[in-house]
């Protein structure tokens, strides 16, 4: 978890200048995952090759909303982008969430993260809210996306 959190913090600082405020959020998410992990309801996936981490994603239960999962901390290393790793990680979140009985997956991202946004849209997520915030030291458009799982994996119709 420490490696994942550190690497994401570095990449987002180098790429977007988001610095220690985002680093603190990433570390809090990783710590909460370790501290409050719910087997069968939450999971972290790590993509790796030859012992090197190429990307990761978390899926956790949304606090106070047991029918909703939250996709957290998706990232792919720059040299591994374009290989389908991000798409595979997001698809695995969807599969797991369906199997775990969630009704929705929600996520929070930023408009500048165009590759991630394309992955979310291709998986069926839709933007349900956006706002300009300055939490990381400069104006950024943050977005909340939602995936309704019964649309992705509909229940079988009655005979």
Image (cartoon, rainbow, N blue to C red):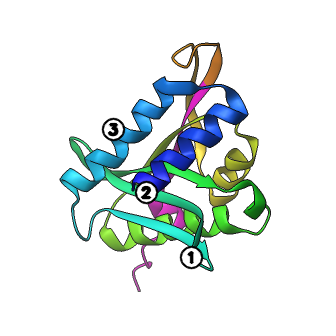
Q: Earlier in the sequence, mark 3 or mark 2?
A: 3
Where is mark 3, residue-wise? 28
Where is mark 1, residue-wise? 51
CA gap between label 3 and label 1 equals 25 Å
Quarter of the image for residue 84 reads bottom right
Q: Nearer the viewer, residue 104 or 134?
A: 134
Does the stretch in magenta take in 150? yes
The circle on residue 58 is 2
Of marks 3 and 2, the one in the foreground: 3
Q: Is residue 153 at least partly visible in the picture? A: no
Q: Residue at x 29, y 52 (%)?
A: 33
* Quadrant of the snapshot with the N terminus: bottom left
* Dot 2: element: strand
* Residue 80 image offset from top left, x and y in percent: 74, 64
* Dot 1: element: loop
User: Is 82 located above or below residue 40 in the figure?
Assistant: above
| Tag 3 and tag 2, C-beta contact below 8 Å | no
Residues rendered magenta in the picture: 142-159
Q: Residue at x 26, y 46 (%)?
A: 32
Of marks 3 and 1, the one in the foreground: 1
Q: Nearer the viewer, residue 1 or 69?
A: 1
């Amino acid at each position: 978890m420490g490696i994942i959190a550190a690497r994401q913090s570095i990449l987002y600082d180098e790429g977007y200048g988001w610095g220690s405020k985002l680093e603190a959020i990433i570390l809090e998410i990783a710590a909460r995952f370790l501290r409050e992990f719910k087997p069968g309801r939450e999971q972290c996936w790590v993509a790796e090759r030859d012992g090197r981490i190429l990307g990761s994603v978390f899926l956790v239960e949304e606090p106070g909303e047991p029918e909703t999962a939250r996709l957290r901390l998706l990232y792919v290393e720059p040299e591994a982008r374009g290989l389908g790793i991000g798409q595979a990680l997001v698809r695995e979140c969807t599969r797991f969430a369906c199997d775990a009985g969630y009704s929705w997956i929600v996520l929070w991202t930023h408009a500048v993260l165009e590759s991630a946004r394309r992955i979310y849209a291709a998986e069926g997520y839709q933007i349900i809210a956006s706002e300009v915030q300055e939490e990381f030291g400069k104006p950024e458009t943050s977005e909340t996306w939602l995936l309704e799982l019964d649309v992705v994996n509909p229940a079988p119709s009655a005979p």
